[in-house]
Structures are given as structure tokens and as C-alpha cells.
Image (cartoon, helix red, strand yellow):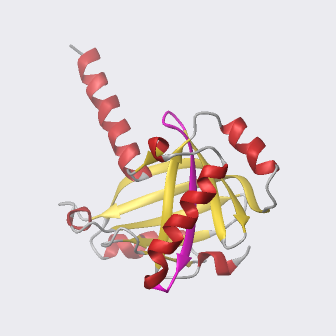
Amino acid sequence: MSQEHFQGRFEVELKYRLQSKADFMQTLSRIPHEIMLQDNIESDWHFDTSDGELAAQSKSVSIRIMEPSGIKLWIVKGPEPDRCEATNITNAANAMSMLKTMGYEVVLKTKKVRSIYFIDKFHITVDTLEGIGDFAEFAIMTDDESMLSTYKVELEELAQRFGLTSSALQTQSYKQMFMEKRERESASACLDGL
């Protein structure tokens, strides 16, 4: 794994909904790139207090386990939209236990299939979320806050090479998408019970 792609306190990320994952992958095959991993199953446990204190502060804390790569991460995002820090951990069960001891609880568990590719200094993450769709995230992490707007423009240009425009841009986090899906399913179950 190329660690320099994932170092920094800030992340510039543009997420696009894919109309055709196959077309996206065909375009990627014509662009020089490196493969970090393909078709990993990522399980995320999202934590918050019972009253949603972290969400109210635009913060999130999650523990991620990636298989078969074996990568385990502790991820903190926010409160600024570009603020994201992740660190490798060796024992996800202990990390989750520590969060629970500190008063946090699991508010959502999610799963996705993820592949990560490197094009120069950028990384592209291709995700499939069951019942939600396929997405591509174009991103870079940095400690240089002054470069955020420059990187955003460069990422937009890279996305355009894949035929992706602002009309496909997604501003919701995966967590928000999964929460909305859960709410829709819950409402549908209630209606079916009438």
C-alpha cells in the first residue's frame, strides 16, 4: 500500500454517482494507474453518543475493517468538510470497546465493496453500496491547507476525463445515504404493517 496517498489532516474529495461502472472501468483501463486493492469488503461501524452529539458538531468517528486486505482503521472526520484523519489499528474489537467505554454507541453499521487505484498523486476509490449504487471518489490527502482549492480543480479535471460532470456529483456522505435508506425501509415496513 502506498502510504503517502493517505497522509494528511485534510482530504479533498469529489464523489460521483456512476451511471455505468463498466464504462468507468473501461476508461480507467486506458489511463496509466496503479492498483492498491480490488473488491475489498469494507465494514464500517459508525459511533456517536445517544443524543447525536458528534453529528450535531459535524463530526464522525468510525472503525473500518477491510477484507481480504486485513487493513483496520480508526477514522475521524470533521468538523470542517475537508478534515479527515485515519490511523491504522491492529485490534478493531478493542478500539470499538474503548469507544463504548467512552460513552459512544454504534449508530450505524455499513458494508461496501471497494477498489482503490492511484493516478499520479491522486487516488480513486470505486465503491458499490448494496441497494444504493456505484460511486467513484476522486481524492487527495494533504497537510497543506493552502492547496485545497487547487487540488479540487485538478480533481474535477481528472473526473472529466472519465466523463463525470457536476450533475453526477454527490454531496451526501455514504453514512447519510445508508441512514436515509434505513429510514425508507423502516417507513416502508410500517406502511406494510397497516
Question: Where does residue 159 sit, x and y in percent of width and height?
Answer: 60, 53
In the image, is 156 to the left or to the right of 10? right
Question: Where does residue 3 sit, x and y in percent of width and height?
Answer: 67, 79
Vertical relation: 145 (above or below) 162? below
User: Can you say which quadrant of the picture contains the C terminus?
Assistant: top left
Instruction: Name which residue lies at 72% across and 36% down.
Output: 22
- In this view, the residue in front, 94 or 169, is 169
- Of all residues, the one furthest to the left in this rendering is 51
Question: Where does residue 171 sit, x and y in percent of width and height?
Answer: 39, 51
Q: In which image quadrant can residue 20 be found? A: top right
In the image, is 151 to the left or to the right of 39? left
Report if residue 18 lies within the magenta region.
no
Question: Where does residue 133 sit, x and y in percent of width and height?
Answer: 53, 37
Instruction: Name which residue lies at 72% across and 70% down.
Output: 120
- In this view, the residue in front, 147 or 44, is 147
Part of the protein shown in magenta: 130-144
User: Can you say which quadrant of the picture contains the N terminus?
Assistant: bottom right
